[in-house]
């Protein structure tokens, strides 16, 4: 999977303002709406929050990957957000999340969703990558961590 086919600088926000899980998710969904990637923000929000109720997508080491399958997209879409101060995302390790990678895929597609999550996880599992993202001063610097 080529991340450059999914992510670009218009889908990166390095100064998220939200102070809780719902606000962060809404802010990232707004980014998708602004870029014409989302048909129905309310449905997408509902689907992501349902997924969050099943199990938090706050993983570990300051990373959260809110994701869901939804009818609000025709193809896999994603965006990246950073909030240096961190937000409680009910992470497995209890550490606030400050790197957010939101992804949505069509309800009837399995392969691309799993491939995207695997590729993103491979990159952000290294401390070096996470530090580069947190210290990025531009959207292009964030994307460079992902080879874009």
Image (spheres, grey):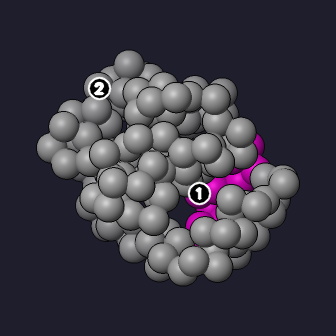
Of marks 1 and 2, which one's residue comes earlier in the chain? 1
The residue tagged 1 is 6
Instruction: Name the front one of labels 1 and 2.
Output: 2
Compared across the picture, whether 140 is left or right of 62 comes to right
In the image as oriented, which residue stretches furthest toward the top? 42
**Residue at the image point whose x is 67% and y is 69% from the top:** 131
| 115 or 85: nearer the viewer | 85
**Residue at the image point whose x is 71% and y is 39% from the top:** 15
- Circles 1 and 2: CB distance less than 8 Å? no
Residue 107 seen by the camera: no
Residue at disc 2, secondary structure? helix
Asked if the magenta segment contains residue 10, the reply would be yes
| 136 or 28: nearer the viewer | 136
Residue at disc 1, secondary structure? loop
- Which residues are drawn in magenta? 1-12
Q: Tell me how many marks there are.
A: 2
**Image position of 29 with respect to 41: above or below:** below
- The percent position of residue 95, horizontal first and vertical second, equals 41, 55
The residue tagged 2 is 46
């Amino acid at each position: 999977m080529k991340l450059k086919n999914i992510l670009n600088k218009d889908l990166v926000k390095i100064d998220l303002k939200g102070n809780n899980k719902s606000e962060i998710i809404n802010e990232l969904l707004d980014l998708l709406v602004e870029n014409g990637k989302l048909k129905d923000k309310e449905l997408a929000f509902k689907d992501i929050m349902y997924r969050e109720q099943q199990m938090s997508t706050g993983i570990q080491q300051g990373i959260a990957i809110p994701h869901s399958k939804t009818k609000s997209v025709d193809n896999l879409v994603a965006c990246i957000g950073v909030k240096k101060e961190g937000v409680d995302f009910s992470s497995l390790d209890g550490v606030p999340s400050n790197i957010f990678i939101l992804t949505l895929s069509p309800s009837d597609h399995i392969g691309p969703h799993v491939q995207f999550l695997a590729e993103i996880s491979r990159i952000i599992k290294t401390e070096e990558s996470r530090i580069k993202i947190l210290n990025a001063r531009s959207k292009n610097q964030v994307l460079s961590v992902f080879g874009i």
